[in-house]
Amino acid sequence: MAVKIPPLKWSRETFDGLIRNFRFPKRWDARYPEEGQTAADAPAGYITLFWDFFSLGNFRLPVTKFFLDILSYYKFHISQMHPIGMARVCHFKFVCRTMHIEPSVTRFRVFYQMH
């Protein structure tokens, strides 16, 4: 028996709080989705970023070179990344920086395998 799961909804106030709290510059032109839109409906030139990336994954913009290197090495788009994977990448980056080591894909691969 399939269970129908309703789409997650968030309010305009929550979106505005994200923009304000994470200090998105106006030039990024972050947009709140229209009623009924999904992550796949991002306009041309835009990407969908999920609240969980910021709240659970500790993701921040602008992204670091290390993060771009991870996306490039594993050949996937940020929209394909799960928030838990985001948390792993960010945690690894924090640990490296704490130890005054530059994070790299080579070092990351010693500890993690992406699936």
Image: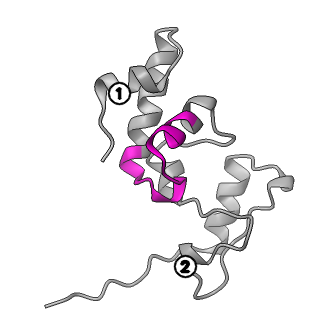
Q: Quadrant of residue 114?
A: top left
Residue 84 percent across, percent down from the top left: 36, 48
Which numbered circle lies on residue 109?
1
Q: Are marks 2 and 1 in contact (CB under 8 Å)?
A: no
For badge 1, the amino acid type reads Arg
Provide the residue designation for mark 2: 38
Name the residue furthest right: 27
* In the displayed structure image, the side of residue 48 where residue 75 appears, left or right: left
For badge 2, the amino acid type reads Thr
Q: Quadrant of residue 11?
A: bottom right
Give me the residue at 48% from left, 47% from top.
75
* In the displayed structure image, the side of residue 107 where residue 79 appears, left or right: right
Q: Secondary structure at mark 1?
A: helix
Q: Quadrant of residue 40?
A: bottom right
Residue 54 percent across, percent down from the top left: 54, 49
Residue stretch rendered in magenta on the structure: 69-85
Q: Earlier in the sequence, mark 2 or mark 1?
A: 2
Q: Secondary structure at mark 2?
A: loop
Residue 76 percent across, percent down from the top left: 48, 51
